[in-house]
Image: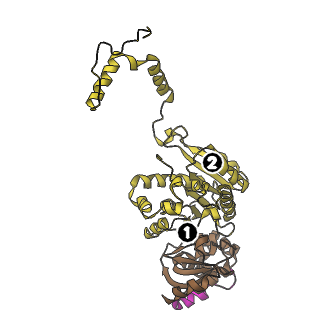
Amino acid sequence: MRLLTHNLLVCPVHREALRIEQVRELEVIAAEYRPEFIVRMLPRLDWGVLRAAAAATAAAAEAGRLEALPPQAPDVEAIQAALRDGQVAQYEGLLQTLHHFLVETHVITARLGCPHGEQYAIDGGIPNLLAEAAISPDAMEDVAAPAVAS
Amino acid sequence: MTGTRPEYAAPPQFYYNADEARKYLSNSHLVETQTRLAQRALELASPVSPPGTPGEPLLFLDVGCGTGLSGDVLTDAGHHWVGVDVSEFMLTVAVERDVDGDAVQLDMGAGLPFRIGVFDGAISVSALQWLCNADRTEHEPRRRLRQFFTTLYASLRKGARAALQFYPSGEAQIGMILEQARVAGFSGGLLVDYPHSTRAKKFYLALRAGPPEPGDGSLQPLEEDTEGNVAIDFQRRRQRRCRNRAGATHSTREYIERKKQRQARQGKAVRPPSKYSGRRRSGRAF
């Protein structure tokens, strides 16, 4: 699951953003860089969720990349205007970073956590959001224990 | 599709098991059909006036993505996509095939868990009819359809299109699906490709998230001739059948002898022909 998909997903029960937790496997797969797609997605992103997800998935070696994400969402209109005029060079670094996090970073094995306590497993890159597969807050203690041990 | 409908066999998460999922890799006819349906769905779901430059990469939702055959069509068109499906086996095959989109396992009847207005369009190949079944006691098709359509509407951008190909089991089911789509706020309706052919006939729900647009009238169903298929002359065929009935060829002596010979060749017990074969009854009482 890409971080872009994660950014669009909400908890099926409470319709709130999900946190990426207990990351055990990540994969970075190079993809074609298309700035127009990134700019198109910009207004739809939840910047806070993206920053949290990037922090959860960025390896120690990528600290520099993480710093390239400003704490506040960038001015989308300015970037769109720049893209139209072909003056996108000044945003190149930001767009490359976004491309890396949104499109190239895949979460393979982890958990998705709702602030209300539900947890959903990501296994083999596929998040399981089925209601019956949710690990409810009450049952979490029993299920989480062996998962950590393995 | 011949034989029993797969929806009646088992719920989708059980019907699409490992064996069934593998069929979607090996069966070339199945792959070809799915690809063609997906291409048509993409055509119907593409924005009439593309926002921005033509050929701009868009973000699509693929409902019931399965092994990602329909997603490949989106990838080939240069779009990004997120696929949702209830069957773990199908999604596993999709991941093994290294499809370009992201797969999420969920039950579309429980609603699509996406933020508001994030997708540029949605396609679906042969998935909607699964929603019309109650696989569990708490399942109520009408409510599940409504849940699906309202959350689909919410996840699409304003004015985005959705094209959902499905295999309806009858008029009543089409009515139910259309009604729930309308309740959710969609405009548009049913589009039937190859309406005069029993086999090639395909049903699409061509929807638009929002009020209808002038360009919507440009959606035309495909007819046999556009694909180069031979249009069958139904009138001539019917005439031929009528002539057969009127001519009553079955009771002539030649016909009876020919039939006796054929059945004898097939090894069936046949009475030898006699001078009485094919004669009219005298009309006298016994």
Of A56 and A75, the residue lying toward us: A56
Which of the marked residues, 1 or 2, is nearer the chain's N terminus?
1
Q: Residue at x 49, y 60 (%)?
A: B15
* Residue B68: % across, % down: 49, 63
Of B3 and A89, the residue lying toward us: B3
- The quadrant where residue A66 appears: bottom right
Range shown magenta: A59-73
Q: Is residue B69 left or right of residue B27?
A: right
From the image, which quarter does the C terminus of chain B lie in? top left
Asked if disc 1 and disc 2 are in contact, CB closer than 8 Å, the reply is: no
Under mark 1, the amino acid is Gln
* Residue A4: % across, % down: 59, 74
Counting every numbered tag in the picture gives 2
Of B113 and A116, the residue lying toward us: A116
Q: Secondary structure at mark 2?
A: helix
Q: Which chain does the residue under circle 2 lie in?
A: B
Please tell me the colour of chain A.
brown
- In this picture, is B285 found above or below B29? above
Q: In the rendering, which numbered label is found on residue B105?
A: 1
Let me know if residue B170 appears in the view. yes
* Residue A148: % across, % down: 52, 88
* Residue B14: % across, % down: 50, 62
In the rendered image, which residue does mark 2 sit on? B173
* C-alpha distance separating marks 1 and 2: 26 Å
Q: Secondary structure at mark 1?
A: strand
- In this picture, is A86 found above or below A141? above
Q: Residue at x 53, y 60 (%)?
A: B12
Q: Which chain does the residue under circle 1 lie in?
A: B
Q: Is residue B115 left or right of residue B224?
A: right
Quick one: which chain is yellow? B
Of B251 and B94, the residue lying toward us: B251
